[in-house]
Image (spheres, rainbow, N blue to C red):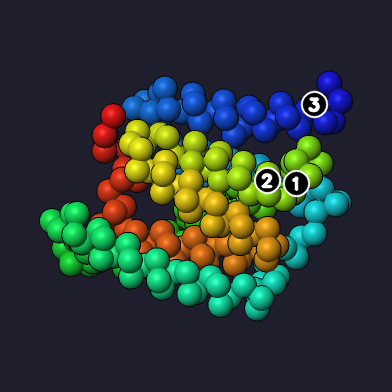
Amino acid sequence: MNAHQYRWFELFSVFIFLPCIAYLFRAELANWLFPALITLMVVCTYLLISDPHFKRFRLTSLGQFSAIKKRLFSMFFIGALFSGMLYGLISQESWFALPINSTFDWLVLLIAYPILSVLPQELIFRSYFFHRYKRILPSKTVRVVLSASVFALAHCVYDNWMAIILSFMGGLLFAYTYAHSRSLAVCVLEHSLWGLWIFTIGAGKYLDAGVTFT
């Protein structure tokens, strides 16, 4: 197996096969999702920093943030306004339920979510994915779409279509941002804004392994 073939084998094994196995055994693995995410992040980080071709400053610098910040914040504010109003119309009983009914939990989420959830996801699905598979996926557009697709597939463990749809849409946005900013920090910022907003308005219930709409 040459290097090219190994990259394809690795991509399929880690980003397609493992999520499918996790879905099949989602009930048994429910308590292991977070440890698995952190473990995979550690492995991906090691492979990245041990690769002499990887530019380590991409993990901490803001990259081309100045060139995309207007688009990033304008899309978020417009999208947040629209999604907040729409979700309020279709699910009034859970609209802003978290900050109203569980303020302490919401405040903890504001701090913990970007560090313990967003950072590992963005490092794996953006920094690692874009660098690791650049040779077998030379097209930036293909990497953006495939990154979003495997990101959505990873959320199939929540066993509802809304989690997959939201993850694919978010994955496209975050992958596009990474492709143009080349900055992990910028993607973490954008992902955190959208993720925290989703949890704040109440739509975070779809990212719960106990919710099923199949």
Residues packed near mark 2 inside 10 Å, few (<14), some (14 to 19) or many (20 plus): many
The residue carrying mark 2 is: 143
Q: Nearer the viewer, residue 42 or 189?
A: 189
Q: Name which of mark 3 and mark 1 comes first in the sequence.
A: 3
Residues packed near mark 1 inside 10 Å, few (<14), some (14 to 19) or many (20 plus): few
The residue carrying mark 1 is: 139
Q: Is residue 147 left or right of residue 99?
A: right
At label 1, which amino acid type do we have?
Ser
Expressed as whole percent of the image width and height from the top left, the position of residue 63 reads 70, 70
Labels 2 & 1 near each other (Cβ < 8 A): yes
Q: Is residue 46 left or right of residue 197?
A: right
For the residues labelled 2 and 1, the Cα–Cα distance comes to: 6 Å
At label 3, which amino acid type do we have?
Gln
Residue 186, placed above or below residue 169: below
Labels 2 & 3 near each other (Cβ < 8 A): no
Residue name at image x 35 percent, y 33 percent: 159
User: In the rendered view of the protein, which quadrant contains the C terminus?
Assistant: top left
Where disc 1 sits, the SS reads loop
Q: Name which of mark 2 and mark 3 comes first in the sequence.
A: 3
Q: Quadrant of residue 162?
A: top left
Expressed as whole percent of the image width and height from the top left, the position of residue 179 reads 68, 58
Q: Is residue 105 left or right of residue 10?
A: left
Disc sitting over residue 5 in the figure: 3
Expressed as whole percent of the image width and height from the top left, the position of residue 16 reads 57, 30
Residue 58, placed above or below residue 48: below
Q: Nearer the viewer, residue 107 or 4?
A: 4
Q: Residue 126, can we see it?
A: yes
For the residues labelled 2 and 3, the Cα–Cα distance comes to: 17 Å
Residue name at image x 63 percent, y 27 percent: 13
Expressed as whole percent of the image width and height from the top left, the position of residue 137 reads 75, 41
